[in-house]
């Protein structure tokens, strides 16, 4: 698993931890996990290859990859079991089975990356909030005219995918000039 994806996806999903849906605090979640492993050495040492002290020392490095030991520690720390989606169309696999009521749902991609999985209802709610925020920004902050936004709005499509053709009228941030007077 990549070096920060478990902690970032956990930070983004975990409602009961101090990180409160904020992936940018993945380093704090990692530090809490390392401290938990040290405090509970007897429960985890048998599952770690090599020297325990060296393992947890290396684990402090944000570039260090993590795995099932850390997943199990996070599950116990925050009283949430992990469900991992590994293949499209297949049910999630119960990676931890502590019988906790709350679950963390992740997908495992490309054999080395974890990411958060959210319900359709959560995504719809987030989309509604985002649309309200953008409307407030466009009207109140940027004072953009509605007509100038029309070309950049995605037309409804059955596949609900963005395509390069549909977005050609929108200027990329790579093409914009941050030194221009408008900034």
Image (spheres, rainbow, N blue to C red):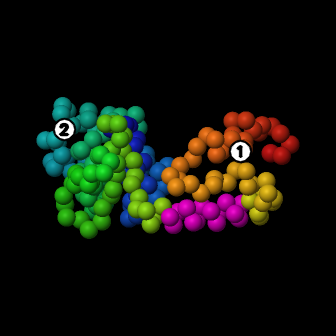
Q: Position of residue 84 (x, y in %)?
A: 29, 51
Residue plotted at (68% across, 41% down) = 168
Residue 50: quarter of image: top left
Would you name the residue on which mark 1 appears?
Answer: 170
Indicate the quadrant containing the N terminus: top left, top right, bottom left or bottom right: top left
Indicate the quadrant containing the C terminus: top left, top right, bottom left or bottom right: top right
Q: Is 166 on the left or on the right of 101, as rendered?
A: right
Say what secondary structure mark 2 lies in.
loop
Q: Position of residue 175 (x, y in %)?
A: 73, 35
Tell how many labels. Answer: 2
Residue plotted at (39% across, 47% down) = 115
The residue lying toward the viewer, choosing from 16 and 115, is: 115
The residue lying toward the viewer, choosing from 159 and 98, is: 159
Residue plotted at (24% across, 65% down) = 100
Magenta segment, which residues? Answer: 124-137
Cβ atoms under marks 2 and 1 closer than 8 Å: no
Residue plotted at (19% across, 64% down) = 99
Q: Position of residue 30 (x, y in %)?
A: 37, 46
Q: Is residue 163 above or below residue 98?
A: above
Q: For residue 9, say whether it is visible.
A: yes
Q: For residue 33, say whether it is visible.
A: no
Name, please, the residue furthest toward the front. 158
The residue lying toward the viewer, choosing from 131 and 137, is: 131
- Residue 48, label in figure: 2
Q: Is residue 176 covered in magenta?
A: no
- Magenta stretch: helix, strand or loop mostly: helix
């Amino acid at each position: 698993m990549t070096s920060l994806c478990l902690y970032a996806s956990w930070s983004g999903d975990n409602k009961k931890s101090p990180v409160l849906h904020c992936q940018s605090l993945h380093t704090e979640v990692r530090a809490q996990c390392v401290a938990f492993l040290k405090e509970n050495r007897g429960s985890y040492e048998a599952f770690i290859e090599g020297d325990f002290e060296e393992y947890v020392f290396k684990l402090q490095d944000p570039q260090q990859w993590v795995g099932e030991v850390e997943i199990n520690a996070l599950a116990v720390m925050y009283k949430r079991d992990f469900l991992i989606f590994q293949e499209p169309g297949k049910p999630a696999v119960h990676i931890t089975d502590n019988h906790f009521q709350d679950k963390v749902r992740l997908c495992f991609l490309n054999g080395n990356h974890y990411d958060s999985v959210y319900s359709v209802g959560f995504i719809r709610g987030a989309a509604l909030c985002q649309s309200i925020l953008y409307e407030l920004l466009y009207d109140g902050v940027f004072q953009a005219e509605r007509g100038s936004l029309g070309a950049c709005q995605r037309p409804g499509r059955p596949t609900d995918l963005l395509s390069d053709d549909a977005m050609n009228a929108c200027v990329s941030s790579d093409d914009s000039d941050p030194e221009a007077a408008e900034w």
